[in-house]
Amino acid sequence: MKILVVEDDLSMQKSICMGLRKFSYAVDAASDGEEALRLVEIHEYDALVLDWNLPRIDGIDVLREIRKNNQDIKILILSARSDVEDKIFGLDTGANDYMAKPFHFKELEARLRALLRRRFTQTDTRMSHGELLIDTALKTAYVKGDLMELTKKEYGILEYLMLNKDRVVSAEEIIEHLWDSSFDGFSNSLKVHINSLKKKLAALLGEQEVIKNRRGLGYYIAEVPLDAY
C-alpha cells in the first residue's frame, strides 16, 4: 500500500515514514499543503496521514480540495488540535479518521490498516487462498501453517494481489501502490520480486500455481481461471 505523509515537523515526518516502511508500506512525504496537493495529483495513494497546521495551504483546505474529486482515498488527520470540536470538524469535512498528538505509532498503523481494509471491503486481518494464508496485521504469510520467509516487497506484492483477488492487476498498478515516487520506471525490479515470490510458493506448494499472469495485462490470484480476460 502507498501512503503520503504530510507533516511539516521534519523529525516527526521522518519518524512516521520510517515506521510505516518497516511495515512494508511504500511512503512519500510532503512538508506543506501545496506539495501534498501536487503529489496527490501525480500519484495514486491508498491513504494520507495529514497534519492540520501546514505551511502554504493548511491541512483542512488540502482535505477539502482532495474531496472535490476523490472520495476513495483514505485520509487520517494527525493533529495537535485535540478538542472534540476540532475532531468533529475534521471528520465532517471529509477525513476518515482523526488522531491527536502526541500519539502512539502502533495505534496509527493499526488505524491505517483498518482504513485500508475498508477500501478493499475486507473486515478480517487474515486472508486465505487454498493452503496459503496471509495476516495483514502481522505482515506475514503462511503455507500449510508454516511461516514463509519473504522480503518486504515480496510480502507487499502478495498482499496486494490477495486484496485484489479475482482481478487482473497491471504491473503499473502494482508499482504505483507498492513503490514510492523515486522508483525507476525502467527497472525490472517488479519482475524480479514476482519471480522470487513464485519460486518460494512453488517450493512449498509444488505444482499449485498461486500467482498467475496474463501476458500484456498483469498478474492475479483467483480460485478459478479468469477466462473473461
Image (cartoon, grey):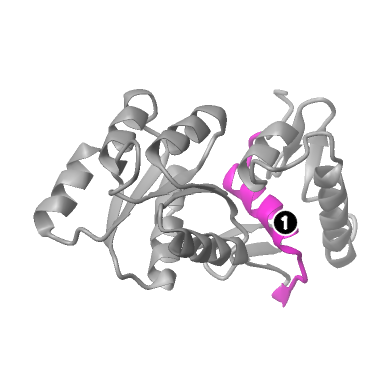
Does residue 112 appear to the left or right of 223 in the view shown?
left
Q: In the rendered image of this protein, does residue 63 appear above or below residue 1? A: above
In the image as oriented, which residue stretches furthest toward the bottom? 146
Tally of marks: 1
In the rendered image, residue 92, in percent from the top left (x then y), is placed at: 18, 41
Is residue 59 at least partly visible in the picture?
Answer: yes
Does residue 20 appear to the left or right of 170 in the view shown?
left
Residue 143 lies in the magenta stretch: no
Residue 148 lies in the magenta stretch: yes
Q: Nearer the viewer, residue 71 or 105?
A: 105
In the rendered image, residue 179, in percent from the top left (x then y), is placed at: 67, 46
Does residue 24 appear to the left or right of 101 in the view shown?
right
Q: Secondary structure at mark 1?
A: helix
What residue is at 82 percent from the left and 56 percent from the top? 197
Q: Which residues are magenta?
A: 145-167
Q: Nearer the viewer, residue 3 or 37?
A: 37
In the rendered image, residue 55, in percent from the top left (x then y), is placed at: 35, 43
Q: Which residue is mark 1?
A: 153
Q: Quadrant of residue 185?
A: top right
The amino acid at mark 1 is: Lys
Q: In the rendered image of this protein, does residue 36 appear above or below residue 53? A: above
What residue is at 45 percent from the left and 52 percent from the top? 117
Q: Quadrant of residue 69?
A: top left
Does residue 92 appear to the left or right of 127 in the view shown?
left
In the image as oriented, which residue stretches furthest toward the left? 85
Q: Residues within 10 Å of mark 1 (few under 14, many from 20)?
A: some
